[in-house]
Amino acid sequence: MKALRWAAGLAVVVLGAGLASAQSLAQTPPMGWSTWNHFHHDISDALIRAQADAMVASGMRDLGYVYINIDGGWEGYRDGQGVLHPNGNFPDMKALGDYIHSKGLKFGIYTGPGPKTCAGAPASYGFEAQDAKMFASWGVDFVKYDLCSFRENMKKEAGDDVQKSDAMMKAAYAKMHEDLAATGRPILFSLCQYGWGEVWSWGPEVGASMWRTSGDINDTYDRMALNGFGEAGLSKYAGPGHWNDPDFLEAGNPGMSADEQRTHFSLWAMLAAPLIAGNDLTAMTAETKSILLNREVIAVDQDPLGRQGDRVWKEGPLEIWTKPLEGNAMAVALFNRTTGATRMTLRLKDVGWKGKAAARDLWVHEDKGTLSEETSLTVPGHGVVMLKLTRSNR
Ligand code: GAL
């Protein structure tokens, strides 16, 4: 009995250590790039190398974008020994990982707990430990684990029993976490199951550093807004090591206006969301760069306090969000969700600010001096004004 209790205690300690090391990989929200939003399945070794080169040449790496993540579309077939082979576009994953690492970047890959990915390629069901070991041998640093066909397993075994089906889902994520931890390589674990079963309340328990809170983003204002503003109320679940993920960025893709893209980037920063770019890094306009490389907005996202922001004021389609920052500072974003430019009033009492505030505009890159109790600002249609407030003695 005593020995049993000792063994159970040890298991908890070991699992606890695994969790601590997994989550210490993301003290601030992870930053990087993923194939999915722009290239979908049209990906290859050469494309990944070119994106890695552009990540460095553009200056993005030096601002913290380090993960180069291959999403669905790399898989080939699983052989009789259970080995999952990449398709012909990826001749040598270890060499690709080495190339990514040689640029000072990190290597991410995609699979899922079901027998198949959403695109019908082989995923890790029944081969979790084997796949985890292979990823570690390739030098993988990040695994996105997408529920996809595991939903069918849940349906088959649990039917309409939500509790049972949620328990199956958690167990499937916990299993891969344990298998990744057992490789001994620090691998960031990113959950993708569209926010099912309030994943934010149990993601950390299964070793997740980040978890998707919603369905797929696409390159439209409406879908971006649904995912981003839809995180209102979830701030308490995020913190150093574990983050709510409203999905990859669409900035730099053609579907949104510049104001919409600035809204998108500001909102993700207010949400302390992972900043995983989803555009073609080899073909960025000056405007795209001014968004993705806006170091003042990135600093809000990456603030060491690690607090997610939330909505503090709303009147119809006009919203004000705040995010606490280190040094008693605060980011404030005024969002106009109508299509026309609108005057909005920032009242210090509405954002919970006591005393005097000095403001800096994080898109215009300009100090605005000490604010009065009420400031009226013009916010463009589908646009944002984003400020950083600090204590002012004047
Ligand atoms: C979806 C997932 C997307 C992308 C896609 C690949 O299930 O939410 O982010 O990974 O699969 O097929």
Image (cartoon, helix red, strand yellow):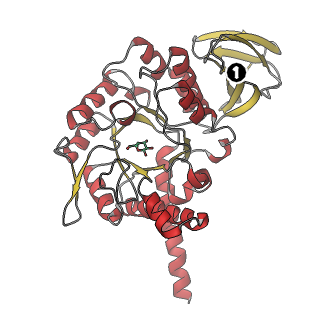
Using the image, determine if residue 151 lies above or below residue 241: below
Query: The residue tagged with tag 1: helix, strand or loop?
Result: strand
Q: Quadrant of ligand 1?
A: top left
Q: Quadrant of residue 381?
A: top right
Mark 1 lies within 8 Å of ligand 1 (Cβ measured): no
The residue at the point 38 percent across, 14 percent down is 285
Q: Quadrant of residue 44?
A: top left
> In the rendered image, which quarter contains the C terminus?
top right
Question: Residue 196 versus residue 185: which sits nearer the camera?
Answer: 196
Using the image, determine if residue 343 lies above or below residue 175: above
Using the image, determine if residue 365 lies above or below residue 350: above
The residue at the point 56 percent across, 52 percent down is 196
Q: Position of residue 164 (x, y in %)?
A: 57, 68
| Residue 249 appears left or right of 82 | right
Q: Tell me the amino acid under the disc marked 1.
A: Leu
> In the rendered image, which quarter contains the N terminus?
bottom right
Residue bearing mark 1: 389
Q: Position of residue 283 (x, y in %)?
A: 32, 19
The residue at the point 54 percent across, 31 percent down is 223
